[in-house]
Image: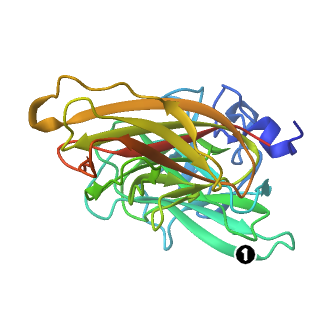
């Protein structure tokens, strides 16, 4: 399966002053910031410096000093990092601050550029105080790259107030398409046919490939996907059951569970089960869960509370 360079590598990693899988190594730094980064505001060794004492995962960290210059001291990556347009991305950083008082914030931005080096989008990953003083904190953010983005830069700044801030590493990587959604209202089922289930409320939707308006996962690119269905039924009677299936682009749904008659009904006639499968899918196909009630009448209901009906998906390998 052919994949472009970014997808084959999977990771675009910038480690500031770290030692693990680093592209930017603090040991190479002398009187300037680490290679690959530039100071966009502030003065080296006055507002920013290397710190070898307050470390987390690497040998050195970037330290913003407790100065109050005219503008926020900041660094920015010099080189453009390659980006695939409309691609889910995951950003991670480890940061620390000596104070979490109101206004003592760290700001991290991703600047997206098109192929002609024109700025097309700015994503604010973090712009807040940390949650605890003098404690390393992970900052994580998922987003989808801009439709015309071909490359990006990362900018990190500290509010120009008197507190120390530290950054151990920054990581930017391709994220898999992933979603989790559930049914927010009851749905009456028709017996002896496939009933497609709209899970209309998203818990998360990385890459925005799941459509809550119709309950469909629109396959973003060729690949293998892990899919998980949970069905909760109400108002069942003895000897009724359901077939559980997954439909792909209007074709005959693939049955995941043939079902067996239920002879002993739980409290309030409630029944719930879950099933998983892995499918090879093609970009543009639509995927949706379905159930076929084998019932005495049209009495079954897909529940929403206290039982839950849900649909989850995760890209395993993309092309």
243 over 197 or under it: above or below: above
Depth check: give the residue in front, 279 or 269: 269
Q: How many marks?
A: 1
Q: Is residue 226 left or right of residue 118?
A: left
Depth check: give the residue in front, 178 or 241: 241
The residue beneath circle 1 is 119
Tell me which residue sits at (79%, 36%) in the image.
9
Q: What is the residue that sits farthest to the front in this orientation?
A: 296
Percent position (x, y) of residue 175? 62, 44
Q: Is residue 129 left or right of residue 303?
A: right
Q: Is residue 82 left or right of residue 89?
A: right
209 over 135 or under it: above or below: below
Dot 1, how many residues are within 10 Å of its Cα: few (below 14), some (14-19), or many (20+)? some
Please indicate, yes or no, whether residue 54 appears anywhere in the rendered image. no
Tell me which residue sits at (49%, 54%) in the image.
205
Percent position (x, y) of residue 171? 62, 42
266 over 269 or under it: above or below: above
Q: Quadrant of residue 122?
A: bottom right
């Amino acid at each position: 399966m052919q994949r472009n360079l970014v997808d084959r590598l999977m990771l675009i990693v910038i480690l500031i002053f770290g030692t693990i899988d680093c592209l930017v190594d603090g040991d190479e730094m002398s009187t300037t910031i680490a290679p690959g980064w530039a100071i966009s505001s502030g003065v080296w060794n006055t507002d920013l410096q290397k710190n070898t004492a307050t470390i987390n995962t690497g040998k050195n960290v970037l330290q913003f000093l407790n100065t109050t210059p005219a503008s926020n001291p900041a660094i920015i990556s010099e080189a453009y990092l390659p980006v695939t347009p409309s691609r889910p991305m995951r950003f991670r950083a480890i940061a620390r601050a000596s104070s979490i008082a109101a206004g003592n914030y760290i700001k991290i931005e991703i600047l997206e550029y098109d192929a002609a080096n024109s700025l097309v989008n700015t994503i604010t990953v973090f712009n807040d105080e940390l949650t605890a003083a003098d404690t390393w904190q992970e900052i994580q953010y998922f987003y989808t790259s801009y439709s015309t983005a071909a490359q990006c830069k990362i900018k990190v700044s500290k509010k120009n107030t008197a507190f120390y801030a530290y950054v151990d590493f920054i990581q930017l990587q391709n994220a898999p398409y992933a979603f989790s959604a559930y049914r927010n209202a009851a749905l009456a089922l028709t017996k002896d046919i496939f009933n497609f289930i709209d899970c209309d409320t998203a818990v998360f939707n990385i890459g925005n490939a799941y459509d809550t308006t119709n309950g469909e996962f629109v396959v973003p690119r060729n690949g293998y996907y892990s899919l998980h269905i949970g069905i909760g039924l109400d108002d069942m009677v003895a000897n009724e059951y359901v077939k559980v299936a997954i439909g792909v682009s209007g074709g005959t749904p693939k049955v995941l569970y043939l079902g067996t008659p239920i002879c002993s009904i739980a409290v309030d006639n409630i029944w719930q089960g879950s099933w998983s499968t892995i499918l090879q899918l093609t970009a543009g196909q639509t995927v949706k869960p379905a159930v076929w009630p084998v019932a005495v009448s049209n009495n079954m209901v897909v529940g929403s509370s206290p039982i839950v009906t849900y649909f989850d998906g995760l890209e395993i390998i993309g092309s």
